[in-house]
Image (cartoon, grey):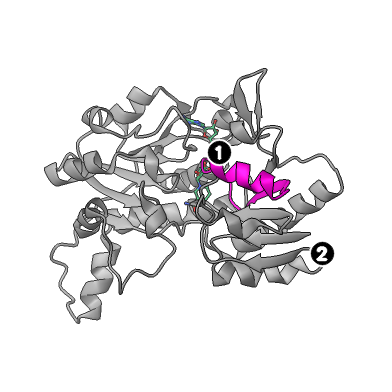
Amino acid sequence: MKLILFDAKKYDKDYFDKYSKEANVDIVYEEQKLTPETSHLADGYDAVCVFVNDIVNREVIDKLCEFGIKLIVLRCAGYNGVDIKYAKNKITVVRVPAYSPNSIAEISIGMILTLTRKINKAIEKTRNYNFSLEGLVGFDLFNRTVGIIGTGKIAQEFMKILSGIGMKILAYDVYPNYEIEKELGFKYVDLDTIYRESDVISLHCPLTSDNAHMINKDSISNMKNGVIILNTARGMLIDTKALIDAIKSGKIYGAALDVYENEKNYFFNDCSKTGVDDEILKELLSLDNVIVFSHQAYLTEEALTSIALISLNNIKKFLNNEFLNNEVFYDETQDKIVDFRK
Ligand code: NAI
């Protein structure tokens, strides 16, 4: 099996190379993302491996089919970058549904605490020998309410941590899981209640055709004053301009963002010399109560190991004609994308 792995970084190579030989997969690492413009690079391979910001639209799928490629290996959970409906009966799509939900859950609490306890500012001050506590007054999370949107694998791990802190947990999901609700001790409510009652709102749902910009001017106006927004899910879930306006007006206390709606041009790359050409991102980064990570929530040794092992195992199953439990496909009888989530 000859695989071309797009948007390759050193850490991808480090982890895939550990296991690819044993799996009998020859990997060529390509730094560029897969896009309509770079799709010609896939000619001559049996499969492509892509990540969160590669663009696998109709045009790319047609090209891949032209080259005789039969498999798209997503080395991530989210599949919003692939036109799954169009891929039906043309090319198989597999993903890594969970690689380390704990990685994202653990960093999430760090991101909230960075805002509530001004950890970034404290570190900066002491580095400059400024040991005064001026400007560092924070607030406790204990007894406050967190609203979780999407109660899948990551959210469940996160809720365990939040319970330990003593937060009251409200949650919303289009497919509520009442067993988990009982087990973890949270309460399902509607979105309006999440907005109205939460001190912290955390996004853990996929980006779908229905929920782009779900955090927008209107939903923000229904939120509690001084709410904190945490997004480790997908950038497009938030209308960033509306978020910025609300932070500037004081309606929103602050935001911790691991993802950004136009991240694909910058995230994962060192732009310190070239700068960025995105006024919204620049404004976001200039705000005091905003922390932005460049989609690093998953980046742990454990997650990178799982990503490599599960991706290679997906390939093995495909080659052996075994049942693909990690396949994502469009089911016309239900008119929806099926991903064996539950
Ligand atoms: P999951 O599939 O286990 O859970 C997602 C949950 O969201 C499901 O319970 C589903 O019913 C629910 N959902 C779907 N549409 C919804 C909607 N419109 N409103 C509310 N709930 C909805 O996924 P998992 O593993 O927990 O990941 C969640 C998201 O986190 C992924 O979709 C991905 O976008 C993002 N992610 C981010 C990473 C990062 O490094 N920042 C790494 C991995 C995932």
Sequence-first tag of 2 and 1: 2
- The reply to whether the magenta stretch includes residue 26 is no
Task: Tell me which corner region of the image, top left, top right, bottom left or bottom right, holds residue 170.
Answer: top left
Crowd class of label 1 (few under 14; some 14 to 19; many from 20; radius 10 Å): some
Position of 309 relative to 252 (above/below): below
Q: How many marks?
A: 2
Residue 249: give its label.
Answer: none
Instruction: Look at mark 1 in the image and give the residue it sits on.
Output: 58
Instruction: Look at mark 2 in the image and give the residue it sits on.
Output: 24
User: Percent x, y for residue 169?
Assistant: 42, 35
Identity, as a three-letter code, of the amino acid under mark 1: Arg
- Residue at image position (54%, 68%) is 9
Residue found farthest to the right? 320
Position of 237 relative to 112 (above/below): above
- The reply to whether the magenta stretch includes residue 77 is yes
Q: Is residue 300 left or right of residue 15?
A: left
Residue found farthest to the top? 333
Q: Is residue 221 left or right of residue 184?
A: left
Q: Nearer the viewer, residue 135 or 13?
A: 13
Q: Nearer the viewer, residue 188 or 278?
A: 278
Dot 1 lies on which element?
helix
User: Percent x, y for residue 123?
Assistant: 28, 72
Dot 2 lies on which element?
loop
The N terminus, quarter of image: bottom right
User: Percent x, y for residue 233?
Assistant: 45, 44
Q: Which residues are magenta?
A: 57-81
- Residue at image position (46%, 43%) is 163
The C terminus, quarter of image: top right
Q: Is residue 78 in sight in this rendering? A: no
Choose mark 2 or mark 1, whichever is in front.
1
Position of 304 relative to 105 (above/below): below
